[in-house]
Image (cartoon, helix red, strand yellow):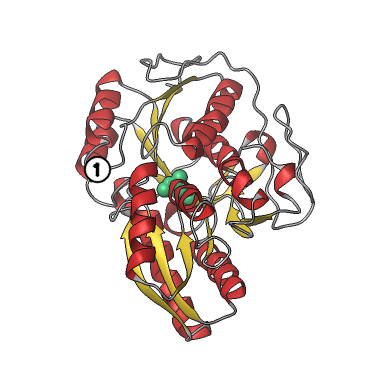
Amino acid sequence: MKFARKRVGAFAAVAVAAALVMTGCADTGASGGGAAPEEGGGDANLAITFLPKSIGNPYFDTSSKGGQAAVAEIGGTFAEVGPAESGPEAQVSYINTATQQGVGALVVSANDPKAICDALDEARAAGVKVVTFDSDTNPECRDLFVNQATADGIAKVQVDLIAEQIGGAGEIAIVSSTANATNQNVWIEKMEALLASDHPDIKIVEIVYGDDDEQISFDKTAAVLQSHPNLKGIISPTTIGISAAARYLSTSDYKGKVALTGLGTPNQMREYIADGTVTAFALWNPEDLGYLSAFAADALIQGDITGAEGDTFEAGNLGKFTVGADATVLLGAPYVFDKENIGDFDF
Ligand code: RAM
């Protein structure tokens, strides 16, 4: 199936399994930007607070947009809070505040698998349901994890892309997000294993961390290119990293010589696809991820699910989902963007 062309107001279900589904974004009138949540309708506490790795990242702006639309459909109250910079401890104070406010659920993308666990334990002890999405904590710290795509699938799509782009051999580097990020670290581990088994002639010579900060990622890209004159390619499994790396490459002598792929948003990568800096990259739909995560939070609050394997719940216009092993719900498969299809997407 194909995504609807730059559609913002409705879902367009597309027809192939690998394709994404665009999330609707009705004007919810729900609160945002850190406003204190209020209790939702009925007996259930439907105050649902999103806590991304950091605010100001377009990826999380989009996931929160999906979350806000879902919370409006549910009839709850949406809030988004979060630190300006991604860091292991940076989310703790926001979790504590949400606990004090007595929200119904926290929906968190974790900067670290362990660092926020004590705060999440306190939240859960106080009755707050905890959904992780995008980047998990250790499983015992949350009720449910909403995964955008399998880690194996996310690793494979990036390895396949770089292998194709550099002709199956040569030195590559990784420009990641923060050193502790659960999601990037799992993906990198799986990419290393896949390269070793399927592409032994491709060698990762360095992994650098741009901290999901545009300028740090830009500077780290410049440094890694200088340190490794034979570099053939870069994988950046972060939307901030890949767009910063592309910005660096696009005006450098490396443009067209050093391949760049990874995980990016179409809107941040559009100009670099157009100017030939990047030929293809991957992602899922962050809006759908936020939308699904809010419905998962609602299902926990209502007691429709507990996180047990086999539990099912309805997620609005995304349909029915089933909880899998380790209290994980899967959104779908990653999708590859290139010059042929990027014009179809607006996020
Ligand atoms: C950045 C964040 C996020 C990740 C995407 C791909 O926006 O690190 O956690 O899932 O990139």
Question: Residue 297: x, y in percent?
Answer: 47, 35
Is residue 213 in view? no
In this rendering, would 41 be left or right of 92?
right
Instruction: Point out the residue furthest to the front here.
Output: 253
Local packing at callout 1 (Cα closer than 10 Å; few below 14, some 14-19, many 20+) is many
Of residue 47 and residue 245, the one placed in the foreground of this image is 245
Q: Is residue 73 above or below residue 133?
A: above
Of residue 158 and residue 302, the one placed in the foreground of this image is 158
Of residue 176 and residue 20, the one placed in the foreground of this image is 176
Q: Is residue 78 above or below residue 139?
A: above
Tell me which amino acid carries mark 1: Ile
In this rendering, would 90 be left or right of 271?
left
The quarter holding residue 281 reads bottom right
| Residue at 58%, 37% in the rendered image | 287
In this rendering, would 249 be left or right of 347?
left
In this rendering, would 98 be left or right of 2?
left
Q: Secondary structure at mark 1?
A: loop
Q: Is residue 335 above or below residue 152?
A: above
Question: Residue 303: x, y in percent?
Answer: 47, 34
Q: Is residue 209 above or below residue 76?
A: below
Q: What residue did someone put label 1 on?
A: 116
Is residue 187 in view? yes
Figure label count: 1
Of residue 120 and residue 126, the one placed in the foreground of this image is 120
| Residue at 39%, 17% in the rendered image | 37
The quarter holding residue 196 reads bottom left
Question: Residue 56: x, y in percent?
Answer: 42, 31
Question: Residue 141: x, y in percent?
Answer: 29, 47
Figure quadrant of the C terminus: top right
Check mark 1 vs ligand 1: CB closer than 8 Å? yes or no.
no
| Residue at 69%, 44% in the rendered image | 21
The quarter holding residue 336 reads bottom right
